[in-house]
Image (cartoon, helix red, strand yellow):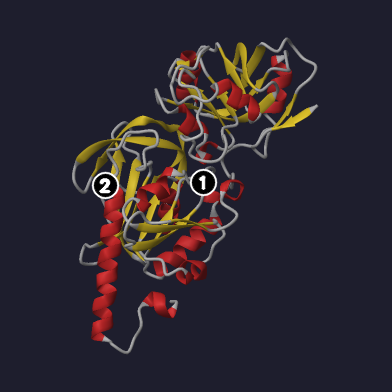
Amino acid sequence: MPVTDYATTQTHTAGSGPPAEDALLVLEDGRTFAGKRFGAVGETFGEAVFATAMSGYQELLTDPSYHRQVVVATAPHIGNTGWNDEDGESSRIWVAGYVVRDAARVSSNWRSMRTLEEELQAQGIVGITEVDTRALTRHLRDCGTMRVGISSTETDPAKLLERVLQAPAMIGADLVADVTTRRTYLIPAQGTRRFTVAAIDLGIKSMTPDRMAERGIDVQVMPAGSTIADIQAIGADGVFFSNGPGDPAAADQAAGLLTDVLEAQIPYFGICFGNQIFGRVLGFDTYKLKYGHRGINQPVMDLRTRKVEITAQNHGFAVDAPLDTRVETPYGLASVSHICLNDNAVEGLQLTDTAGNLISFSVQYHPEAAAGPHDSAYLFDRFIDIMLAHRNSEGADAERSPGLSTAHEVGI
């Protein structure tokens, strides 16, 4: 009978086909790898990408940014810590498929509640193991990311290739609606509440609002279709745009909302997809990287402090902005704040006023770092600093004009 994957673009068909232990992987350029079934029996399609993390596979698989992507693990041994109910970054697995070299036969971690393969099967995720992932990764580095199919029901590579070539490409894909929350929900501040933040869910990981709540922030996680009126209605001191899947050039609704946020002069912090949307609104183009940055070992320099940090990343697109020039925008002066030390790609943007004060910023990586590292946690404190400065500025304006309310109070 048909088995439909959690991802809206994939359908798996179990039944007739080769022995269940055999599986086939075919890239859109015809390169073929044979292996063994891992996870659900069936067939899946997506964009082939590789991730260099040596740990944290549960957090990776449940990251909504991997929607419609088939992930190749470069670490050779996957699954030894099993699966638990605490470490997921969302309520489900989002990858379209999973490719590993050596799937663990035994789960040995004391927190494990079931095996990785059992969870893949339960959620209908098709995978493949006993693949030469080193050769596959080198091929993707040389030729770039591309569409791929994995099947444990098809023995003919040519037939599988035909279906791979019919699969949608990532360029031009607007996937935010697939991953965003359907309703607003609150992650309450821990301890005394200091601020309220509207976190726009473009594919948010659960650890991100937790990191803000730890700092005394009430986090209202809101659907991607929210409006500036919705944000002002909760009295937001700041706005946060999360990570997410797809092509930022196609995310017009998110870009429109962020334009309204900046026009309302509300402090902004964005990560990953939120960095790319910030770049668009500031007037920069975005482009597709050859094979992207995915893993928890990506070196980045903060140009404000010259500090080098090791970061967790998952993105296939980047912002095309000048590295050494400030650009005038309707909202302030925009400049690059972080760069990748591997390829000089833009890893962060900042917006300052004419006095040089930081008023909004973004980074192209995951400061919540689930799973690790934790070098970038200071960015949440930087967000608090600009919200506090904005609050103090509004208070000073109110003192100078006692007959006027603050922007949030009058809804402008």
Vertical position of residue 368 compared to residue 158: above or below: below
Q: Amino acid at mark 2?
A: Tyr
Vertical position of residue 180 compared to residue 121: above or below: below
**Position of residue 353 measured from the top left corner of the image (x, y, whole percent):** 26, 65
305 and 181: which is toward the camera: 181
190 and 89: which is toward the camera: 190
Give how far apart the Cα atoms at labels 1 and 2 are: 22 Å
**Position of residue 301 measured from the top left corner of the image (x, y, whole percent):** 25, 39
Vertical position of residue 346 compared to residue 212: above or below: above
153 and 113: which is toward the camera: 113
Q: Residue at x 32, y 34 (%)?
A: 373
Q: Earlier in the sequence, mark 1 or mark 2?
A: 1
Q: Residue at x 74, y 11 (%)?
A: 18
74 left or right, relative to 41: left
Q: What residue would you read off at disc 1?
A: 203
Q: Provide the secondary structure element on which disc 2 rests.
A: helix
Q: Amino acid at mark 1?
A: Gly
Q: What residue would you read off at disc 2?
A: 378
How many neighbours does mark 1 have within 10 angstroms: few (below 14), some (14-19), or many (20 or more)? many
15 left or right, relative to 266: right
Q: Residue at x 23, y 45 (%)?
A: 303
Q: Residue at x 54, y 52 (%)?
A: 251
Q: Provide the secondary structure element on which disc 1 rests.
A: loop
Location of the C terminus by quadrant is bottom left
The answer to whether residue 336 is seen in the rendering is no
Location of the N terminus by quadrant is top right
Quarter of the view holding residue 357: bottom left
